[in-house]
Image (cartoon, helix red, strand yellow):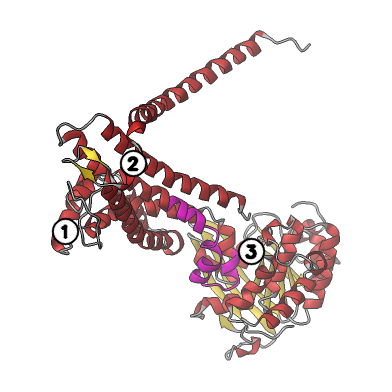
């Protein structure tokens, strides 16, 4: 991937286990008196795609928000437990901005910032201090290529990003997340606003990206988790029911009856 | 099958009735405004001329023009704008982008709204105490303009904050997720997308001070001063006070003169509003999301 600004993954000195990108211990999240997630403990390994499936309101998005400390920006959101990113507790980061720069996030609804396509993708590198146009040009092209958007926008890089179609804006959002050169990429139902063909193209890209980065993929589409994820967690009503190798999960090797029923489409 | 039933007819009659009612209310509202403008133009227009705008009052203000008052008002409004714009925008930025949602912020917001309701004569007395006497600016343009600025600050803050709040929250979150600080988010996303709205609101609010009389009367506006101010520490004539003076304090003023002054005063306010509206239309065409 493009070499720029962001801190290297290996700088976390006190990493507990080198193969674990993310360690979550007894994570509970509540909004005021309403509990969203209870006592979740799981690990995400380096360079894997970790799928999270589950019906609506099962705490998947809250889980992602706790990982890059978005709770700071959410009034009333209360997080307990531990989240370690490459061995370092996210709450011990004095500089949250540096933490967030290492973590790319894509939300379900596309957010094309009201600036040019080029500026959208160049924003994160610029935030981390890159000014040289030649360097930015390379990053922008590479990230747009990876998000399967380059061919469609290469002739109008300087038109407004917020005027692209919904699907294009979502790919722009993905390109923007990639421009951070993230060690950890959080995808929250990224394909909701994208057509099936483009979704397949992005899925192929995600499989490629696995070589360089770790991906947490929250999805409503059970089959998408099956296609992409190395391991999959099943969340239900704020509880992590189980974590298993995706193959096992879909081959029926589940421990909990509820997981089997959800995966087989009997509820959800 | 498609015959109108009795209930359809009744709904239709109610519809017509309400449309008529609301329409008449609207006309009732416009009527006084149209009347004022009509009378002002009818009685004031004969007085108006380039000479009227560009010459000094003579014969104990019963003849001549309004040039010193015109220039004085421009001074007052310009200095008030320069003073209230940075302070108001900074305060609004803090309230909109930084302030935590707690009781203190809510109290400040409440205070700002209430401050907007303080009568202008009270602001005038505050201005005398603070700027004329305490800071020793004397009765001067500076003291008067600062009084005007204080008076408009609450509304400037509110309109600025609203312009910033109109920028979708999702844009901010997208920036924060990339590791942008709040200031980076403000500079790259919030301000570029609200600056025109901010300026529109500020111009609109400050232009209202053109007509204010009480706050400047004790702080910097002079009864009669037939030459132009040289600096912000001079006193000056002002349109609003001049109108007040020739309408009530000076005997034997020809009938057309106050109407002429009032017409120019209204034209000044309306032209600033026009600038603001033109700005807003320009902004709407450039809307980016």
Q: Main secondary structure of the magenta part?
A: helix
Classify mark 1: helix, strand or loop. Answer: helix
Vertical position of residue A19 compared to residue B264: above or below: below
Q: Quadrant of residue B96?
A: bottom left
Query: How many angstroms separate mark 1 from mark 3 (CA)?
Result: 47 Å
Query: How many angstroms separate mark 2 from mark 1 (CA)?
Result: 26 Å
Q: What residue did someone put label 1 on?
A: B132
Q: Are marks 2 and 1 on the same chain?
A: yes
User: What percent of the width, then of the height, locates residue B268?
Assistant: 38, 44
User: What percent of the width, then of the height, locates residue A116?
Assistant: 67, 65
- Would residue B199 be counted in the magenta stretch? yes
Q: Are marks 1 and 3 in contact (CB under 8 Å)?
A: no
User: What percent of the width, then of the height, locates residue A42?
Assistant: 66, 74
Q: Nearer the viewer, residue B216 or B229?
A: B229
Give the residues drawn in magenta, as a range: B174-202
Give the chain letter at badge 3: A
Q: What residue did someone put label 3 on?
A: A115
Residue B265, which numbered label? 2
Question: Is A167 situated left or right of A180 in this image?
Answer: right
User: What percent of the width, then of the height, locates residue A172?
Assistant: 72, 65
Q: Are marks 1 and 3 on the same chain?
A: no
Earlier in the chain: of badge 2 and badge 1, it is 1
Classify mark 2: helix, strand or loop. Answer: helix
Figure quadrant of the N terminus of chain A: bottom right
Mark 3 neighbour density, 10 Å: few (under 14) some (14–19) many (20 or more): many
Q: Quadrant of residue B180?
A: bottom right
Residue A248 can be seen, yes or no? no
Classify mark 3: helix, strand or loop. Answer: loop
Query: How many angstroms separate mark 3 from mark 2 (CA)?
Result: 41 Å
Give the chain letter at badge 1: B
């Amino acid at each position: 991937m493009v070499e720029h600004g962001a801190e290297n993954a290996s700088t976390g000195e006190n990493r507990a286990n080198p193969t674990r990108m993310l360690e979550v211990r007894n994570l509970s999240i509540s909004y005021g008196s309403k509990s969203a997630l209870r006592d979740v403990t799981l690990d995400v390994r380096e360079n894997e795609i970790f799928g999270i499936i589950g019906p609506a309101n099962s705490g998947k998005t809250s889980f992602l928000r706790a990982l890059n400390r978005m709770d700071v920006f959410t009034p009333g959101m209360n997080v307990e437990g531990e989240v370690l990113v490459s061995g370092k507790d996210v709450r011990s980061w004095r500089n949250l901005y540096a933490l967030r720069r290492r973590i790319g996030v894509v939300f379900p609804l596309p957010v094309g910032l009201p600036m040019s396509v080029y500026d959208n993708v160049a924003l994160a590198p610029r935030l981390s201090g890159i000014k040289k146009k030649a360097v930015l040009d390379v990053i922008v092209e590479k990230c747009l290529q990876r998000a399967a958007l380059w061919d469609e926008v290469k002739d109008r890089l300087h038109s407004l990003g917020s005027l692209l179609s919904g699907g294009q804006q979502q790919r722009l959002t993905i390109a923007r997340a990639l421009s951070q050169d993230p060690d950890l990429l959080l995808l929250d139902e990224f394909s909701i606003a994208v057509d099936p063909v483009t979704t397949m193209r992005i899925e192929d890209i995600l499989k490629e990206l696995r070589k360089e980065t770790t991906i947490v993929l929250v999805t409503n589409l059970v089959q998408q988790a099956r296609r992409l994820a190395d391991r999959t967690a099943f969340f239900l009503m704020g509880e992590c029911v189980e974590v298993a190798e995706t193959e096992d999960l879909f081959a029926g090797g589940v421990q909990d009856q509820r997981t089997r029923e959800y995966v087989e489409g009997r509820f959800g | 099958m498609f015959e109108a039933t009795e209930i359809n007819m009744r709904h239709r009659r109610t519809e017509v009735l309400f449309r008529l009612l609301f329409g008449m209310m609207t006309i009732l509202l416009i009527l006084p405004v149209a009347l004022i403008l009509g009378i002002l133009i009818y009685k004031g227009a004969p007085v108006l001329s380039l000479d009227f705008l560009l010459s000094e009052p003579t014969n104990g203000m019963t003849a001549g023009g309004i040039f010193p008052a015109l220039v004085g008002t421009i001074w007052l409004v310009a200095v008030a704008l320069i003073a209230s714009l940075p302070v108001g925008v900074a305060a609004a930025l803090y309230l909109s982008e930084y302030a935590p949602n707690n009781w203190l912020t809510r109290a400040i917001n409440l205070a700002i709204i209430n401050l907007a309701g303080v009568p202008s004569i009270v602001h005038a007395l505050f201005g005398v105490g603070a700027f004329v006497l305490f800071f020793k600016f004397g009765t001067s343009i500076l003291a008067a303009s600062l009084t005007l600025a204080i008076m408009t600050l609450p509304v400037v803050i509110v309109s600025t904050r609203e312009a910033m709040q109109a920028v979708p929250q999702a844009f901010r979150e997208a920036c924060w997720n990339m590791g942008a600080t709040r200031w980076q988010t403000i500079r790259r996303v919030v301000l570029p997308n609200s600056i025109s709205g901010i300026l529109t609101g500020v111009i609109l609010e400050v232009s209202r001070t053109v007509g204010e009389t009480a706050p400047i009367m004790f702080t910097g506006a002079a009864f009669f001063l037939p030459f132009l101010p040289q600096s912000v520490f001079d006193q000056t004539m002002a349109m609003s006070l001049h109108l007040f003076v020739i309408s009530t304090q000076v005997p034997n003023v020809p009938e057309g003169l106050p109407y002429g002054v009032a017409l120019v005063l209204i034209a000044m306010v309306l032209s600033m509003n026009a600038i603001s509206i033109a700005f807003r239309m320009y902004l709407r065409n450039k809307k980016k999301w």
